[in-house]
Image (spheres, rainbow, N blue to C red):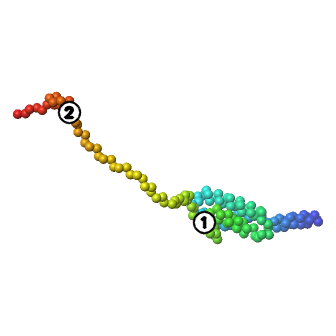
């Protein structure tokens, strides 16, 4: 009958050792709101990447650094704040800046004095000279003789 007692003790000690092992918390418990101008897809991508970042930070920190859930929440909140989301206890994210080029200011240039051309005189009316008229007694082309009326 000594065997069952030893078997029970082995099982109990294995369970006690397994209970002392710290597991990583499943997910952060920080409430975060999406930042301004973030789409739902961008926000979901931030959540996934920051959860992975927080889990990686948990694995690299020594166990004596504090409670696991608090460390996970702090790493997750810091990552989400850096991504531009609204996290309680962190400063409000700045609005998105538009990429507008800065104006270039130049020293005003004095106008250069340029010579002004004299105004063009109006052309004189063209009057046909005596050589342009038909000889006396000859009717000009396209001329119709007046009809005498009584």
Pick the front one: 37 or 43:
37
Pick the front one: 64 or 144:
144
Residue 60 at x, y percent in the picture: 77, 63
**Is residue 88 shown left or right of residue 70?**
left
Name the residue rendered at 89%, 64% in the picture. Answer: 10
**Residue marked by disc 2:** 133
Q: Residues within 10 Å of mark 1 (few under 14, many from 20)?
A: some
Name the residue rendered at 89%, 66% in the picture. Answer: 9
Name the residue rendered at 85%, 66% in the picture. Answer: 17
Q: Is residue 136 above or below residue 84?
A: above
Q: Residue furthest left?
A: 150
User: Does dot 2 land on a helix, a strand or a loop?
Assistant: loop
Label placed on residue 54: none
User: Does dot 1 land on a helix, a strand or a loop?
Assistant: loop
CB atoms of marks 2 and 1 within 8 Å = no
Q: Quadrant of the C terminus?
A: top left
**Is residue 90 shown left or right of residue 61?**
left
Label placed on residue 93: 1
Q: Residue furthest right?
A: 2
């Amino acid at each position: 009958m000594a065997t069952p007692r030893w078997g029970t003790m082995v099982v109990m000690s294995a369970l006690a050792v397994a209970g002392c092992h710290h597991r990583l918390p499943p997910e952060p418990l920080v409430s975060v709101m999406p930042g301004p101008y973030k789409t739902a897809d961008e926000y979901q991508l931030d959540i996934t990447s920051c959860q992975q970042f927080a889990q990686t930070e948990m694995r690299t920190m020594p166990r004596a650094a504090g409670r696991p859930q608090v460390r996970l929440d702090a790493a997750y909140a810091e990552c989400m704040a850096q991504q531009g989301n609204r996290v309680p206890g962190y400063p409000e994210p700045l609005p998105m800046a538009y990429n507008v080029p800065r104006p270039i200011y130049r020293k005003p240039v004095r106008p250069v004095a340029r010579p002004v051309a004299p105004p063009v005189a109006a052309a004189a009316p063209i009057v046909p000279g005596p050589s342009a008229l038909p000889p006396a007694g000859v009717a000009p082309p396209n001329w119709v003789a007046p009809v005498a009326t009584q």
